[in-house]
Image: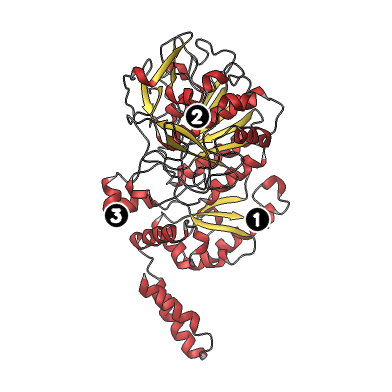
Amino acid sequence: MKKTVFLLAIFFALNSCSREELQNENVKTEMAQKDPLTAKQINERINQAIKTDGTFNWKNESDHFVWSAIFRGNKMVSIGFGASKDDFDRSKSPNSSDMEKEVLSVIKKYEGKDERNFLLLSDQYLNQMDVVIENEETITALRQMKNIRYVEPADYHYFEFEAQYNAAAKSSGSGSSGCGFSSSTLSTADYTSTTPSAKIPWAFTKHSIPDAWNYSTGAGVTIGLIDTGVSPEQTLLGGSFNNGASSGRTISKLGVYNSDGSGDQCGHGTKMASVMAAPRNNAGLPVGVAYNANLIAYRAAENVVLETSSEQTAVKTAFTELGNNTNVKIISMSMGHIFSVGKIEDGVKYAYSKGKLIFCAGGTSTSFTNFVGVIFPASMSETQAITGVKENTSNQKCDICHSGSQIDFTFQMERSSGNTVPVLSYYNGQADYVGGSSVATAATAGIAALVWAKNPSWTRDQVLNKMRQAATYYPNVNSSYGYGNINVLKAVQ
């Protein structure tokens, strides 16, 4: 990697040389660029950027670096085009068709192929496409175009490569996938009972959620959940969604990942759906925050790490579809990546432009990625970033939670005993625990549903301001924990 960078530095320093000397250096540079960087070299640069600058973005890297990652990522490329950085919505982009044709013509010229042989996907809502590109010169040509917003590897498996080269990553299973199908016997100290026969998680009481239910239960509000799906075996998140004191609401399950249905094959999405909207049941199981809210659950990934092209495309699709669903007010996603993904960023911006209130997990990880601050897309200004804190605190993150200046709210989800939040299990009639910034995010989305249901005519900003006013640090912001914990009773009064 150093040799290549050195040769490139020489090349750029030789602008004043003779034509012959310059041509000789060109040959040397081209020879050096024939070989792509190794995945190890690419990952080392990504890690260095995050540790030094706090973030990594493909747009800041050289053509050779980007092409190398494309080469190592099945030669798949994600392209965002537009007249400006905010020109992502096709319906608001009068020159969308012309810009797309121009991009395709450049690829056709440098790849020497018809678009049928390189175009994978052209998004119907966004100024975005996925293509297959072989040549580095194609990448260089594209990145020089005035109507290009980004050119990124679409299928570069950072975590998979990190597990190959990083001992810490290997020992931690390449980061936390968030999956699990276990069931647990809940400690009696971790819940209280309520009518008709439901268990209230201890964390709810810490945020005055049971008292808030006297004012709002989330009725009439629809939450969109983007995750790994919902278990087909858990009837309280299926045919018995209106069990007990929950009534008059609906749950919808959609699959946009790998065409294999909406059923959760990880376990994570089921737990998020539970803490957000499980019914106030008569089965002796945990209730959700907004137990009368509607829920639309998207299966958009295999696990919580959005690494593959199919996962990133599915998440983008879920955001755009939920953005177009006029019934949806809130979107929650407890998944992400350690650096930005252009197509997901477009999807988030699209949903935000439709007035949706978006909550994303600030990050949960082991030692392998704990050098990362707030993960993407929680790091975006269009999202509310949530992290988990220890019981009776608003500024002591859970043992595996991330924090940072981009955090907006916190939720208490870890006890001194180490126990986390009781939820429904993947399996019917059973319960389990779940922690991290994931459960904090889903619970906060549920809190937003309580506030919006109490004030159905309000805008997103009004709901958000009410949540801030009811939080620990309002009107100030903590440097690592945002507004802190929300007193939900205060938020709905």
Q: Residue, x 53% and y 31% (percent of image)?
A: 444
Mark positioned earlier in the residue sequence (1 or 2):
1
User: In the rendered view, does 418 fall on the left or right side of 67?
Assistant: left
Q: Secondary structure at mark 2?
A: helix
Quadrant (top left, top right, bottom left, bottom right) of the C terminus:
top right
Up-down: is 90 above or below 238?
below
- Is the residue under label 2 in contact with that under label 1 (CB below 8 Å)? no
Between the residue at mark 1 and the residue at mark 2, the CA separation in whole angstroms equals 36 Å
x, y (%) of residue 395?
46, 40
Q: Residue, x 36% and y 40% (percent of image)?
A: 399
Mark positioned earlier in the residue sequence (3 or 2):
3
Q: Secondary structure at mark 1?
A: loop
Tell me the kind of residue under disc 2: Ala
Nearest to the observer: residue 485 or residue 164: 485
Task: Please identify, in this view, whether the residue under mark 1 or under mark 2 is nearer the observer.
Answer: 2
Q: Residues within 10 Å of mark 2 (few under 14, many from 20)?
A: many
Tell me the kind of residue under disc 1: Gly
x, y (%) of residue 174?
32, 46
Numbered mark located on residue 213 in the image: none
Quadrant (top left, top right, bottom left, bottom right) of the N terminus:
bottom left
Numbered mark located on residue 82 in the image: 1
Instruction: Find disc 2 in the rendering and name its residue.
Output: 443
Task: Please identify, in this view, whether the residue under mark 1 or under mark 3 is nearer the observer.
Answer: 3
User: In the rendered view, does 311 fall on the left or right side of 416?
Assistant: right
Mark positioned earlier in the residue sequence (1 or 3):
1
Is residue 121 in sight in this rendering? Answer: no
x, y (%) of residue 337?
45, 47
Between the residue at mark 1 and the residue at mark 3, the CA separation in whole angstroms equals 38 Å
Tell me the kind of residue under disc 3: Asn
Up-down: is 374 above or below 388?
below
Instruction: Find disc 3 in the rendering and name its residue.
Output: 166
Between the residue at mark 3 and the residue at mark 2, the CA separation in whole angstroms equals 34 Å
